[in-house]
Image (cartoon, grey):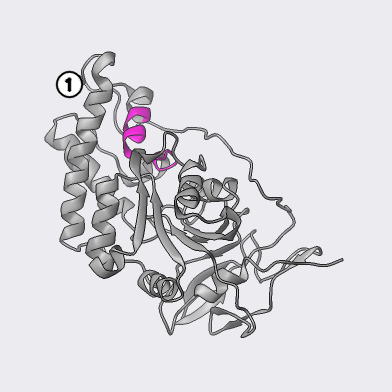
Amino acid sequence: MASSTTAFSLSLPTFSSSTAYNSQKHIPVFSSRANGKSILSSSLLGSKISVNKTASFKPVSIRNGRVSCSASSSVLPSALLFDCDGVLVDTEKDGHRISFNDTFKEKELGVTWDVDLYGELLKIGGGKERMTAYFNKTGWPEKAPSSEERKEFIASLHKRKTALFMALIEKKLLPLRPGVAKLIDQALEKGVKVAVCSTSNEKAVSAIVSCLLGPERADKIQIFAGDVVPRKKPDPAIYVLAANTLGVDPSSCVVVEDSAIGLAAAKAAGMKCIVTKSGYTADEDFLNADAVFDCIGDPPEEWFDLAFCGSLLQKQYVS
C-alpha cells in the first residue's frame, strides 16, 4: 500500500449560517504573550476590538490582556457548549494521534500518521471517518478485509484506539487547557446549562469530562458525542441536537470551538462561537467567529469569562 507520508489533501462541504454575517465585521483576536505581557494580534482578522457600522456590542475593555464587559451587562447564555478535543484538552497531537499509531502498530498495518499528516486529517470530523478517508485515498492495508467488511474493520480499529486513548486520559497525562474549569464553574454557578458536543467517541469524551473535570462537574454536564448524529462537523447536526435536547434557542447559545469545521457547525446552527486556538488549528481561517483567543485562561492571565460570553448576545442595531 501507499506510504503513510503520501501527500493527503481534501475539500470539505460548507454550510450556510442561519444568521446574517457581514464580511466587513472585525472580531477580537488575541495572540501570544511576549516578555510576559499580553499583546494584540495584527493578523488579517483584525488587531483590535471593532464592529461594523450597523452593529455594536455592549462596551468592552481590555485590561492586562483580558476582555472585560461593562458592569451593566446582565445577559447570560442559555447554554454554554464546548467542543472536546482541542478545547477542553489539547488532545490531538499527543493523545489521539499516538493512540491511532499504537493501534496501527498492534495490528501490523504498516501505517504511521506523522504530525503534519494528522493535522491534515483533522479536517475530517470523526475517527472512523478519518481512517476510512485515509485508506480510500492511499490504499487499504494488506490485512484489511474485502470492501463488504471494511466498516466492521474500521469500527474494530476505532474501538481499540479509544481504549488506548482512555488509558492516557485516566493516567491524567493530558491536562485541561487553561481556564476551562473556571468558565464551566462560572456557568454552572449562574444556572447556565453546560454541554460538550464532540465528533469523538462518547466513551472517550466522558472519560475526559469525568477524569479531568471531576465527578461533581461531570454530573451537571450533558455530553453529545460520536455517532449520536448521522452527520458530523462541519454539519451543524450535533449543535442542533444539543439545543433541542437542552430546550434552548440556538441563538441564545455560545459555543467554544478550536477548529474551522467546528466553527462552521456552530454558525450553521445559528449560535455564537468563540474560538480558542489549539496546536493544530492556529493558522486556520476563523473569519466568521465572534471572537478568537489563544485560550480561555485563568487569572491573572485570563482572556475572557462568562460575562464576555453574554456580551456576544447583546448586539445593538443602530442607524
Is 129 left or right of 212, judged from the image as shown?
right
Locate residue 233, reporting x and y percent. Answer: 47, 42
Is 68 left or right of 102, judged from the image as shown?
right
| Residue 187 location, quadrant | bottom left
Q: Depth check: 268 or 147 in front?
A: 268
Q: Depth check: 92 or 207 in front?
A: 207
For disc 1, the marked residue is 143
Magenta residues span 121-133
Locate residue 29, reporting x and y percent. Answer: 59, 66
Quarter that holds the N terminus: top left
Kindly give the residue lying farthest to the right in the view shown. Answer: 319
Could you classify mark 1 by the number of other residues whose Cα lies within 10 Å: few (under 14), some (14-19), or many (20 or more)? few
Q: Is residue 219 above or below residue 83?
A: below
Locate residue 300, reporting x and y percent. Answer: 43, 85
Tell me the SS state at disc 1: loop
Locate residue 77, reporting x and y percent. Answer: 54, 66
> Residue drawn at (62%, 53%), measured in percent from left and top?
288
Q: Can residue 106 be seen by looking at this rendering?
A: yes
Magenta segment includes 89: no
Kindly give the residue lying farthest to the front in the view shown. Answer: 247
Q: Is residue 126 above or below residue 312?
A: above
Q: Can residue 279 be seen by looking at this rendering?
A: no
> Residue drawn at (40%, 32%), measured in percent from left and top?
7
Quarter that holds the C terminus: bottom right
Disc 1 residue type?
A: Lys
Magenta segment includes 125: yes
> Residue drawn at (15%, 61%), measured in percent from left and top?
171
Q: Depth check: 252 or 283 in front?
A: 252
Main secondary-structure element of the magenta-colored stretch: helix
Is 99 left or right of 181, judged from the image as shown?
left
